[in-house]
Image (tube, grey):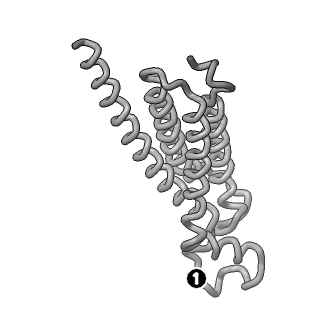
């Protein structure tokens, strides 16, 4: 009887962890929208003040200003996280709780980095650092550098959760 109750608790925990993981990926997808904002520095600039058509600054900014460019960053971020998760899931032990811990770990890292990116945008916006006047990529670099570092941390953390072999997690 106690074993059956414990099994139901493990199942409930796994379902809760899966839901939280899915929600964290949704949040990470939204985080990609913040990052694509940094990649489109001319999005609010009147057309006559934007760089000329055909220049790399204008082409890149225009691409990330609207879909598919504005959504591609989030899809890429979440896609890489999902790929790392599926790789880890294939290698993790089927022992009770191992997969739940894996889902919880991925969800926690997604949430922490998503919040970190949001806070880095707020913090960088307050910094008097101006490598060039607004708008432009020289201005948005103060946003892009911490975002890139946080994403590198995310993928490093998630890659380290992948067991080298199934035997290592039994």
Residue lying at 55% horizontally and 75% vertically, measured from the top left: 44
The residue that appears at 63% across and 51% down in the rendered structure is: 128
Q: Please give left or right for residue 136 compared with residue 25 in the image.
A: right
Judge left or right: residue 165 versus residue 85.
right
Front residue of 65 and 9: 9
Q: Residue furthest right?
A: 55
State which quarter of the image contains the N terminus: top left
**Residue 144 spot, x, y in % from top left:** 66, 53
Residue 111 locus on image (x, y percent)? 47, 40
The residue located at (56%, 39%) in the rendering is: 85
Name the foreground residue: 150 vs 160.
160
Residue at mark 1: 46
Q: How many marks?
A: 1
Q: Taking 145 as reference, is 37 above or below it?
A: below
Instruction: Report crowding for label 1: few under 14, some 14 to 19, many 20 or more residues within 10 A (C-alpha).
Output: few
Quadrant of the rendered image containing residue 137: bottom right
What is the residue that sits farthest to the left in this orientation?
A: 1
Q: Residue at x 69, y 56 (%)?
A: 141
Q: Residue furthest bottom?
A: 48
């Amino acid at each position: 009887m106690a074993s059956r109750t414990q099994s139901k608790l493990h199942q409930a925990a796994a379902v809760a962890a899966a839901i939280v993981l899915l929600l964290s990926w949704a949040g990470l997808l939204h985080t990609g929208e913040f990052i694509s904002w940094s990649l489109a520095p001319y999005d609010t600039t009147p057309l006559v003040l934007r760089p000329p058509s055909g220049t790399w600054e204008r082409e890149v900014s225009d691409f990330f200003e609207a879909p598919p460019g504005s959504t591609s960053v989030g899809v890429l971020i979440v896609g890489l996280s999902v790929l790392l998760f599926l790789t880890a899931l294939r290698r993790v032990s089927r022992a009770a709780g191992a997969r739940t811990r894996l889902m919880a770990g991925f969800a926690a890292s997604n949430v922490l980095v998503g919040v970190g990116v949001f806070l880095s945008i707020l913090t960088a916006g307050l910094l008097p650092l101006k490598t060039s006047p607004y708008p432009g990529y020289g201005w948005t670099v103060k946003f892009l550098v911490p975002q890139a570092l946080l994403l590198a941390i995310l993928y490093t953390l998630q890659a380290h959760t992948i067991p080298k072999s199934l035997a290592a997690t039994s």
